[in-house]
Amino acid sequence: MTSVAARSAAAAVVLALAGGALAAGAVKDPRTLVLQKSDLPAGAVKGPSATASPSTFGDREFTVYFNLSAGKREEVLTSDVAVSGTGKRAATGYRIMLATYTGLPGGSPYKLPAYGDEQRAEYQPDPGRGVLVVHKGKVVWKLVVEDCGPQSPAGCLGGVTPPRLTRAQTLSELEKYAPKQKRRVR
């Protein structure tokens, strides 16, 4: 009976260690890595969100939109995070995300602090949008800030389409929210 108890205890330890190893190798949940309402100013309204598994940019992806008041203007902030099981898959997702969301005609690059292993940030004058795409380890993330106009992914709550955001306005917003996004991804 003692040897049966010892074997059962040993089996329980092995199973616990194996379960911990599986959990450690598991892909993070991107829903916990996107910006949350608590990261934003009071009055921010969470818009639609979407999940994909697998996604074009990683093994699992989550996107959320927020409508923000900025003075008399309404903006939409997009937080998108894709996680992968390997750094190689994330690097591929990063290249695809760059090709999808950056490099538009007339776009001009921003110089921002490093938020990951590699990144690209740019201002797109038409439609007045700031985009930041970052690759860090097994994660790719994207922030987009834009006016609440006809091309806005979340629609407008205020009913009035403001003028396009300027390069300086989108840069200011990216500088405000990128450090918060970086802290979530770590």
Image (tube, helix red, strand yellow):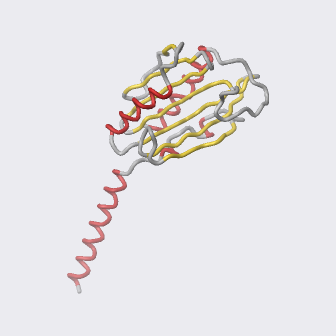
Q: Residue at 38% across / 26% down in the picture?
A: 118
Q: Is residue 10 left or right of residue 66?
A: left
Instruction: Tell me the quarter of the image containing the C terminus.
Output: top left
Q: Residue at 39% across / 33% down in the picture?
A: 136
Residue closest to the far left: 3
Q: Is residue 34 above or below residue 147?
A: below
Q: Position of residue 89 (x, y in %)?
A: 35, 39
Quadrant for residue 154, please give it: top right
Q: Residue at 54% across / 30% down in the picture?
A: 143
Give the tally of numbered discs.
Answer: 0
Q: Is residue 8 left or right of residue 85?
A: left
Q: Position of residue 62 (x, y in %)?
A: 52, 43
Q: Is residue 165 above or below residue 7?
A: above
Residue closest to the far front: 105
Residue closest to the far bottom: 1
Instruction: Tell me the quarter of the image containing the N terminus.
Output: bottom left
Q: Is residue 151 left or right of residue 142?
A: right
Q: Position of residue 151 (x, y in %)?
A: 66, 27
Q: Is residue 93 left or right of residue 156?
A: left
Quadrant for residue 145, please give it: top right
Q: Position of residue 115 (x, y in %)?
A: 44, 27
Q: Residue at 48% across / 15% down in the picture?
A: 109
